Amino acid sequence: MAYVLVQHLAPDHESILAELLSEVTDMGVAEVKGDVRVRPNEVYVIPPSRGLILEDDFLKLVPRTLPGTAHMPIDAFMKTLADVRGRQAIGVILSGMGTDGTLGLQAIEAAGGIAFAQEPTSAQSDSMPRSAIQAGGVDFILSPEEIAGELVRLGQHPYIVGGAPTPAASEAPGASTAEESSDDREGLARILEQLRAAGGTDFAAYKKTTLRRRIARRMAVTRAETLLGYARLLEGNVAEVSALHEDCLISVTSFFRDPEVFDALTERVISALLEDRASNAPLRVWVPGCATGEEAYSIAMCLLERMAKLSLNTTLQIFATDLSESALAKAREGKYVINIARDVSAERLQRFFTKVGDYYQISKTIREICVFARHDLTRDPPYSRLDLISCRNVLIYLEPRLQEVVFATFHYALKPNGYLVIGPAETVGASVPLFKAVDEKRRIYSRNTVDGAPRLLSVMGQRHHS
C-alpha cells in the first residue's frame, strides 16, 4: 500500500514532518512537490501551502482553498481517493481538531472502501475522530497500534487486493455467478432473507453485483471467509445485520450535488412551475432515496430563492423518503458538519442555516417545509399530484424490471405538466414513452401524456404474475 498523510499545517510555516517520519520507518518518505505517481510502500506528506488530490494514479497539488470556502484538505483528498480507487481506498482519521475528514470518510465507505477512526480516548485531540464516528459509516474504531495491525491484514485481503471491477464487467447480466457454488447461492439467499426479516427491505430485485460488493465489504470487515459463513455470523447479530442493511442502501449525498443540475433545475423547471401559479395551489415535490436530507433541503433553498426573486408566497410541500431510519433521523434534525461550507455558499449558509459549534443546522422554516418518512419505492403506494420528483442515484441499484415499475410509479404520481430528475448514470430506458427530455445531458424530463390504461397498473400486473 501507499500511505498519504494529510495534515492541517500553517501555510507560511515550513514543515519538518517528512524528516520526522523518515526517522521511524524504512519506507521512503517525501513531501509532495509536484505531480507524483503513487507507488506502494512509500509515504507521501502534504506540503503546508497547498491542497492535495488524487487523479488517476498521480498525486497532484492544488490551491490550498478556493476564495470564501473553508480549508478542508482531508475531505478534499479523501473524496478524490474514493472516486479513483473505489473499494481499494482506505481512510483513517487520527487525532485532530475540528471535523475535517468526516465527509471524506463517508465518501470512501460509500465507494466500497474501508473507514477507520482513532479510538477517541487514545487521541490527544479527539474532535476529528469523534466527528467521523458520530456521522456514521466508520468500520473500525481502534487505537493507532490496532489500526496498524488491521492495515497489515487488509493489505493482503482479497477484497482489496482484487481491485475494483470495471463497471462494464461488474454490471453484466449474470456477472460473478458463473462459478457460483450451491453454498454461495444458499449463503446469499440466507443473507437476503435475514435483511428482509430485520429491516423489511426486499433486496431480491436489487442488482446482484452491487449487493455482492457490499456484502464482500462487510465480510472483509468482519473477517468472514465465505457467504455461508457470513450468513451464519448474521444470525442473531442485530448490529451486523443493521450495518449490512445500511451498507446496501448506500446513503451518500451532499448539498447541491452536481451544481449544474441545480442551475438547470432552477432556470428550466422551478421557473416554469412558479410561473402563473394560482396562489392557493401548493407546489409539491417528492425526493425518494433522500438519505440524510441534503437533496431535499437543496431543492427547498432553490425554490425559496426563486420565490423571493418573483415576490411569490407559494405554499411548498416537500416529501423526502428513504429506507434508512438512521438517515431519516439525521435528515429531520438537519444538523451538518461545518465541512458543508465547501458545497454551500456563504450567502446560503447565512440565510438558511444557524451555526451551532462545529455544525450548521438548517433553519426551522425549511425543516417545516420538508416531511421525512420511511418509504419503499418499489412496494409502497406513491405520493400523488406532484409537480417535481428528484430521484438521483437510486435507480442504478435496481434491476431493469424494477426500474420499469419505478418509472411507471413516477408517471402515475406526477401531474400532467410535472417534471422528473434522475442521476447522471441513469436513463429512462424502456420507459421512454412516459417522459420527454427537457435537458437530456442533466437528465431532466417532463411527463408525457400516454393513451390507454394507466401504465402503472399494467407494469404492476406483469410484476405480480412474474
Image (cartoon, rainbow, N blue to C red):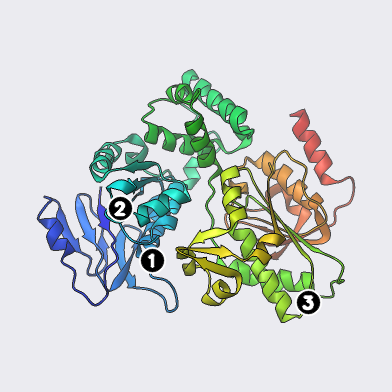
Which of 220 and 367 lies nearest the eye of the viewer?
Answer: 367
Q: Earlier in the sequence, mark 3 or mark 1?
A: 1
Q: Position of residue 427 (x, y in %)?
A: 64, 53
Measured in 3D between alpha carbons, the distance from the residue under mark 3 to the one under mark 2, in whole angstroms, is 49 Å
Q: Is residue 73 left or right of residue 258?
A: left
Q: Earlier in the sequence, mark 2 or mark 1?
A: 1
Helix, strand or loop at mark 1? loop
> Residue at the spot x=44%, y=24% of the render?
233
Q: Is residue 392 above or below residue 245?
A: below
- Identify which amino acid the numbered label 1 is placed on: Met
Q: Position of residue 55 (x, y in %)?
A: 36, 61
Q: Residue furthest right?
A: 452
Q: Look at the image and tell me whether residue 41 can be seen.
A: yes
> Residue at the spot x=53%, y=41% of the render?
246
How crowded pointer 3 is (Cα within 10 Å; few <14, some 14-19, many 20+) is rated as: some
> Is there CB contact under 8 Å for labels 3 and 1?
no
* Label at residue 312: 3
Which callout, 2 or 1, points to the residue nearer the camera? Answer: 2
- Identify which amino acid the numbered label 3 is placed on: Leu
* Label at residue 425: none
Which of 308 and 77 lies nearest the eye of the viewer?
Answer: 308
> Residue at the spot x=53%, y=74% of the render?
345
Q: Quadrant of residue 401?
A: top right
The residue carrying mark 1 is 72
